[in-house]
Image (cartoon, rainbow, N blue to C red):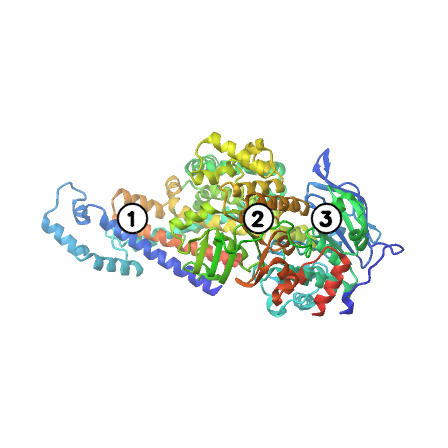
Amino acid sequence: MFSYVLRRIGVGLGLVLLVLTLIFLALHLVPGDPAMLLLSQGDGASATPEAVARVRTQLGLDQPLLTQYWHFLSGALTGDLGESFRNRQPVSEAIGERLPRTLELVGLATLVAVVVGVPWGALAARAGGWFDSVTSVLTSIGIALPVFVFGSILILVFSLKLGALPAGGFAEWGEDPNRHAQILVLPAIALAVGFASTIARMTRSAVLEMLHQDWVRTARSMGLSRRAVFRRYVLRNSLNPVVTTVGIGVGTLLGSTVLVERVFNYPGLSSLLVEAVTARDYPVVQGIVITIAVLFVSINIIVDVLYGVLDPRVRR
Amino acid sequence: MSDLTKKPTTPGPVTPLLEMTDVSVEFGGGKSWKPVTHQISFSVAPGETLALVGESGSGKSVTAMAILNLLPPNARRTGSIRLDGEELVDAGEKRLRQIRGCDVAVIFQEPMTALNPVYTIGAHLVEAIRSHRDVSKDEARATALDLLRGVHMPEPEVKIDHYPHQLSGGQRQRAMIAMAMSSEPRLLIADEPTTALDVTVQAEILDLVRELQGRTGMSVLVITHDMGVVADVADRVVVMREGRVVETAPSAELFARPTHEYTRALLDAVPRLGSGAPATAVVPDRAATAALDLQGVAIDYPGSWRKPGFRAGEDLDLLVAPGEIVGLVGESGSGKSTIGRLAMGLLPVAEGTMTVDGVDVSAGSRSDLALIRSRVSMVFQDPASSLDPRRTIGQSITDPLRWTGEIGDRREARKQAGALLEQVRLPADWADRFPHELSGGQRQRVGIARAMATSPRLLVADEPTSALDVSVQASVLDLFSELQREHGFSCLFISHDLSVVESLATTIVVLQKGRVVEQGPTQRVLTAPTEDYTRRLIAAAPVPDPALQAERRRERLAS
């Protein structure tokens, strides 16, 4: 098991390195000079060659590609992702401010989705009949409904009509923990609905498949109670595909909270990414892409390790 | 060893432990119920071994599962099932749970799928023990260890913490039996307990069941399709067909004087070891160009960057003369299928030389493979999964001809398909049918027709009949040898069943762990084997004759 985990982490590190290299190459192979771009910002006038040369030296663009690559890599690995073109704020600082907010949102949404989705799917598979049919319809709607539509409905009902929860915005935990939590509820639910529907469907089909396995009959033949059989021989074995779904889902959420952040006016990582893209703030875009890539790889490592924990046949 | 030789019990004045009266199992729901078994009646005396035999679809498993109501939710039981006088048909789920695994235990066919892959053997045992006894986990573990010793599990202290996939098939079945024995049941239901196992392992498991029976005095209800197993263990036999009991008789009597026509047909269909060479075997011409010639061949399974490859065969010398059927026998993992794949060009030759029809194809170049594919074809084990379910059988059969470019025209292909189907004694107009519309035997005929399409020099048949019932197997084997005589192709016939090989092959090659242990004319190898392994294989295969089998068992256990 230990060597299995180590191997997973090793593969993950390799992947991160690959992603970093690809990002570096992408930024250096696209046409256009960052220095020109930087200088031409604001006014449309073209910069003097001296100014361009000065900025190039400043940014280290006059050095050989390999040296630049080395600087980029060592910088990225030590958390130095450069400075924003727009406001000279270190990129790592900007990300450090925004990332926890998005993680909090995604984490809460995932928690809700798992806590609702898994039991619901298991129940639908076990109960069958009308409950299963209703589940099938509801989860279809849940998956099909765009986040911004559902988010808007939530705001309409809970904020504007009932006035129960704030429609959006943000409050620091340190300043107003109560409001901080209240603000999180609606966007988390909006994100969780589609996710919970996917998880419920996955759980349902996994449970249905497991119900027909031979070892379930064996467990029954040993005289175990229905509940014990279901819990230890059906649900336990259904978790593997569910873990995959959750892993992929969390990764996707990280990059796709942008709509929810927009609807609820929530200043998270995704909105920063959108801002940076519109402003051509390359260092920030690059830093966020790297962050999301690293998170994605980390989630995959966790999923792989969970696989090993859940299924002894995977460890080797 | 005296406790192993049971006295045959005669049911009569003894009150039966299990009494089934007019038991029918019906599938359906609501108002429409469709019976799959009809008024099955039999009884099992204390200490007795009763065998429930029949071919697939006879309802033997369903009947056995009805006893503890381990049926699917859409099934129901009618009639009377009495265990020690207690009626089980209308017993509640709670009472049935008490009986399951306590008074009556079950072991199943495939211990790989019958054990939960995410729990260790120990966890399974502890669960089984604690479901009926109020003991601590530590005590249960100690008992589990004792149980594993009781079923002669090698290294029980180590294996207790192993997961099912880390054990061999035989060890898994031992673990399964240990679970079943955890509460010293009075009745053990064994549903095809050895079907998935090699013959030598099968013999060990059957010995173990007899030993445990001698120790505890339990009754055994064994469900099987294998007449050899019946002859080996059963005191009495219930023969089932299409959901009905056709004959019930003491084992010795049934084998000596079967009264029902179906029983006779069933016994006749069983291939018997020692029944002599194939009547009209072609005498191989060893001087002519061999269809397949392996000289000092080694085969490697390629590895990946994470795990190294391994050697699946080494030092293989093998010759298939024109028109000759060579039987390739051995247990699972012996490399017999590997040689089949090599002959098909699906695995490369790692060392040595391989000649097909006089051409050296060891290099495995593109042209070599093209040659192999035009001269060699294959019949697969499972006809259900080796035919594309979305294509008509006519299309499947003529596919090889399209690939080799022999026919391109659709009308011509249809004509060919019809002709090929007629060759395997199927109506030509069946070409438009789909595989699911055919029975297992018919599907295998289609498989043979497809292999014959390109008029191959060499046919590789990999366990072509082991998924079929004995009576179907007999007819497919007949067809096969008829075709072989007509067309004179050479054949590499791979099988785990010595008696099947004996009925077809002129030469037999015995494999063990990727090496040839012994080879020679079939009769010589089977009657006067020179190697220990061959002798063990022959001794382990049960023969469908209780008296002879009892003698063989004594000899085997004495040696």
Displayed quadrant of residue A219: bottom right
Asked whether the viewer can see residue B123, the reply is: no
Q: Are marks 1 and 3 in contact (CB under 8 Å)?
A: no
Image location of residue A251, percent across then percent down: 41, 49
Q: Which mark is residue A124?
A: none
Q: Nearer the viewer, residue A47 or A88?
A: A47
Image location of residue B293, percent across then percent down: 48, 56
Q: Are marks 3 and 2 in contact (CB under 8 Å)?
A: no
Q: Nearer the viewer, residue B49 or B383?
A: B383
Among numbered discs 3 and 2, the one appearing first in the sequence: 3
In the rendered structure, which amino acid carries the disc numbered 2? Gln
Does residue A263 appear to the left or right of B318 in the view shown? Answer: left
**Crowd tier of the residue under label 3, counting other residues whose Cα lies within 10 Å: few below 14, some 14–19, many 20 or above:** few
Chain ID, mark 3:
B
The residues tagged by marks 3 and 2 sit, at their Cα atoms, a distance apart of 23 Å
Does residue B248 appear to the left or right of B370 in the view shown? Answer: right
Q: Is residue B431 above or below residue B203?
A: above
Instruction: State the SS at label 1.
Output: helix
The residues tagged by marks 1 and 2 sit, at their Cα atoms, a distance apart of 57 Å
Q: Is residue A249 above or below residue A10?
A: above
Q: Which numbered disc, 3 or 2, marks the residue closer to the eye?
A: 3
Say which residue label 2 marks. B381
Image location of residue A149, percent across then percent down: 43, 35
**Crowd tier of the residue under label 1, counting other residues whose Cα lies within 10 Å: few below 14, some 14–19, many 20 or above:** many
Q: Nearer the viewer, residue B275 or A45?
A: B275
Q: Is residue A197 above or below residue B359?
A: above
Instruction: State the SS at label 3.
Output: helix
**Crowd tier of the residue under label 2, counting other residues whose Cα lies within 10 Å: few below 14, some 14–19, many 20 or above:** many
In the rendered structure, which amino acid carries the disc numbered 3? Asp
Say which residue label 1 marks. A285
Q: Residue at x 66, y 51 (%)?
A: A217
The reply to the same-chain question for discs 3 and 2 is yes
